[in-house]
């Protein structure tokens, strides 16, 4: 921070000083801060990544391929199969539920890309949709 300081002769001189940075921790709370207006850096973090590749709670490449065949095998989307792992929740309704949905959806997309590399499915862009969307077809 810079400030003007008067010298002994009466003239002003620019003096720069370093201001200490204030660190906020959850222990040091202000009487002004309440649960409604808590700063974002003091709020609890999102949950860690959920492992959807477990046999109990998740889906493997083999089970995804079987589910795609059972669903008809043509013009499928990854959202259809992500619903098997987690419900589709809007971020405005429940940030934690939406985070879990996001993880489930990305897990299914990565499995689909792996299946495409193996040559078991084909991925193509959906030209009828205004948004970028991919359709999956089983070979």
Image: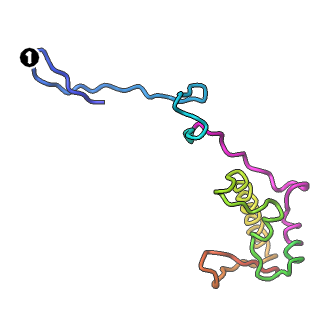
Residue extending furthest bottom?
Answer: 128
Residue drawn where x is 64% and y is 57% of the image: 92
Q: In which quarter of the image is residue 123?
A: bottom right
The quadrant of the rendering that contains the N terminus is top left
- On the picture, is 22 further left or further right than 76? left
User: Would residue 38 be counted in the magenta stretch?
Assistant: no
- On the picture, is 18 further left or further right than 100? left
Q: Name the residue under label 1.
A: 9
Residue drawn where x is 87% and y is 54% of the image: 54
Q: Residues within 10 Å of mark 1 (few under 14, many from 20)?
A: few
- On the picture, is 49 further left or further right than 34? right
Q: Residue 89, how many percent across, how many down?
A: 72, 60
The quadrant of the rendering that contains the C terminus is bottom right
Q: Residue 135, how many percent across, how many down?
A: 72, 78
Q: In this view, does 10 lie above or below 29?
A: above
Residue drawn where x is 80% and y is 65% of the image: 83
Q: Which of 78 and 88 is in front in this view?
A: 88
User: Would residue 57 be counted in the magenta stretch?
Assistant: yes
Q: Number of numbered discs present?
A: 1
Q: Which of 2 and 36 is in front in this view?
A: 36
Q: Which of 42 and 74 is in front in this view?
A: 42
Region in magenta: 42-66
Task: Please tell me whether the stretch drawn in magenta is mainly helix, strand or loop.
Answer: loop
- Helix, strand or loop at mark 1: loop
Residue extending furthest top?
Answer: 8
Q: Nearer the viewer, residue 24 or 135?
A: 24
Q: Residue 46, how many percent across, how many down?
A: 68, 45
- On the picture, is 48 further left or further right than 55? left
Residue drawn where x is 87% and y is 55% of the image: 57
Q: Residue 2, how many percent across, how many down?
A: 27, 30
């Amino acid at each position: 921070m810079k400030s003007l300081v008067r010298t002994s002769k009466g003239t002003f001189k620019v003096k720069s000083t370093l201001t200490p940075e204030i660190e906020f921790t959850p222990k040091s709370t202000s009487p002004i801060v309440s649960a409604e207006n808590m700063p974002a850096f003091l709020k609890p973090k999102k949950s860690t990544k959920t492992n959807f590749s477990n046999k109990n709670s998740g889906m493997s490449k083999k089970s995804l391929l079987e589910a795609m065949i059972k669903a008809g095998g043509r013009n499928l989307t990854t959202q259809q199969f992500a619903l098997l792992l987690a419900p589709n929740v809007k971020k405005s309704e429940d940030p934690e539920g939406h985070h879990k949905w996001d993880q489930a959806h990305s897990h299914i997309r990565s499995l689909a890309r792996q299946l495409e590399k193996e040559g078991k499915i084909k991925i193509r862009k959906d030209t009828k949709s205004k948004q970028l969307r991919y359709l999956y077809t089983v070979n």
